[in-house]
Amino acid sequence: MTFFLEYTIPAASSDAEFEFPHDEINSGTTIPLAQTGAGVVHSSELPARTSIVGATVPEAKLEAEQLISHSRASEAALYFDPSESLGTGVGTLVATFTDSKGWQDTPGEDPQGRTF
């Protein structure tokens, strides 16, 4: 089964930012900020979408929770996406996670035909 977790990674502290070069001409290349003349983009958070291994929704949730616990993210969304897209919001939303409430299932049918 193909699941993806979407979450936002905040910067380490309130006054910190992520910095990375933005160069439309040389897209896809990675060079240290000190060695580029490209404009620098500043962001207080970074969006992430990562593949989660799991044969069932409960297995995917367990794996996703491990990832969340090792990040600074406080909320996330779990998607079933057989197309394996890296696009935001692609697939069927299975559940959402917040630190305060844990997992909240989205009413629907799981990929194996069971109701969740």
Image (tube, rainbow, N blue to C red):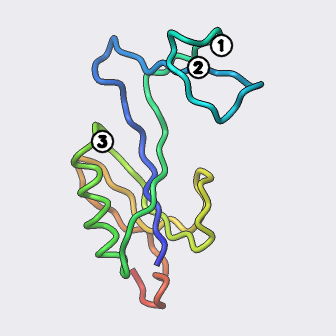
**How far apart are the two marked residues, 2 and 1, measured between alpha carbons?**
6 Å
Which one is nearer the viewer's eye here, 94 or 29?
29
Residue at image mark 3: 74
| Furthest-right residue in this view | 25
Q: Is residue 93 above or below residue 110?
A: above
**How far apart are the two marked residues, 2 and 3, measured between alpha carbons?**
27 Å
Closer to the observer: label 2 or label 3?
A: 2
Q: Residue at x 57, y 17 (%)?
A: 41
**Secondary structure found at label 3:** loop
Query: What amino acid type is highlighted by mark number 3?
Result: Ser
| Rendered location of residue 89, percent (x, y) | 58, 55
Query: What amino acid type is highlighted by mark number 2?
Result: Pro
Q: Which of disc 3 and disc 2 is earlier in sequence? A: 2
Q: Are marks 2 and 1 in contact (CB under 8 Å)?
A: yes
| Rendered location of residue 27, percent (x, y) | 70, 31
Mark identifier at residue 38:
1
Is 52 left or right of 67, judged from the image as shown? right
**Secondary structure found at label 1:** loop
Q: Residues within 10 Å of mark 1 (few under 14, many from 20)?
A: some
Mark identifier at residue 21:
2
Q: Residue at x 38, y 50 (%)?
A: 76
Q: Residue at x 30, y 41 (%)?
A: 74
Which one is nearer the viewer's eye here, 96 or 16?
16
| Rendered location of residue 63, percent (x, y) | 28, 64
| Rendered location of residue 93, percent (x, y) | 50, 65
**How far apart are the two marked residues, 3 and 1, measured between alpha carbons?**
32 Å
Closer to the observer: label 3 or label 1?
A: 1
Which of the 4 image quarters holds residue 85?
bottom right
Query: What amino acid type is highlighted by mark number 1?
Result: Ala
